[in-house]
Image: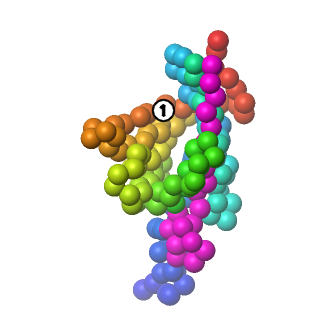
């Protein structure tokens, strides 16, 4: 029989998955596009992320955090996306596993609807999904683990 303390710990673990497998510096090198993404290790249920995309002589960026939705002890984690200084968009965790997490926002008409991360060894696959202009759309990134501030070969 689970004691109330163990039961609370088990519920807490389900609502706040360990996403330490995402931490590190990740680099995606595709023709004409370089994307680097950096995630801190989790500290007190907080991870901070940055993304920098260089494409066609332009740099784009996003600041992100994964944190509890609210400060209550049982609050689930969510992905807070801040692309290029815009207001944050909230994507609560809807599914997670040892090397996979899915975040999904409540709004049906915004793109992206979902953010998915999956790790396979030294590869971090990321994608955003949703409907844009009436069409299902998926954008994918395949990141390799890299040394901090590594760049794609010229």
Quarter-of-image position of residue 146: top right
Asked if 76 appears above or below 40 in the picture, the reply is: below
> x, y percentage for residue 25?
65, 37
**Does residue 47 appear to the left or right of 33 in the view shown?**
right
- Does 38 sit left or right of 9 as displayed? right
Q: Is residue 130 visible?
A: yes
What element does badge 1 sit on?
strand
Residue at the image position 72 percent from the left and 33 percent from the top: 148
Query: In the picture provided, is 119 more to the left or to the right than 52?
Result: left
From the top left corner, tell me how far across and down residue 69 is, in percent. Answer: 54, 67
Residue 20 image position (x, y, % from top left) = 60, 52
Q: Residue at x 42, y 42 (%)?
A: 128
Colour treatment of the image:
rainbow
- Return the residue found at the far right: 149
Q: Residue furthest left?
A: 134
In the rendered image, the quadrant that contains the C terminus is top right
Q: Is residue 33 above or below residue 36?
A: above
Q: Nearer the viewer, residue 95 or 133?
A: 133
Give the camera-side residue of 140 and 55.
Answer: 55
What residue would you read off at disc 1? 141
């Amino acid at each position: 029989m689970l004691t109330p303390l163990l039961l609370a710990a088990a519920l807490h673990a389900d609502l706040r998955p360990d996403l330490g497998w995402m931490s590190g510096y990740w680099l995606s090198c595709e023709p004409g596009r370089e994307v680097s993404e950096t995630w801190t290790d989790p500290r007190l249920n907080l991870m901070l992320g940055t993304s920098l995309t260089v494409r066609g002589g332009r740099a784009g960026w996003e600041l992100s955090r994964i944190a509890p939705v609210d400060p209550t002890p049982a609050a689930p984690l969510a992905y807070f996306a801040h692309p290029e200084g815009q207001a944050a968009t909230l994507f609560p965790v809807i599914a997670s596993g040892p090397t996979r997490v899915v975040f999904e926002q409540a709004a049906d008409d915004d793109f992206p609807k979902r953010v998915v991360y999956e790790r396979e060894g030294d590869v971090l696959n990321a994608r955003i999904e949703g409907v844009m202009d009436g069409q299902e759309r998926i954008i994918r990134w395949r990141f390799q683990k890299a040394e901090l501030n590594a760049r794609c070969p010229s």
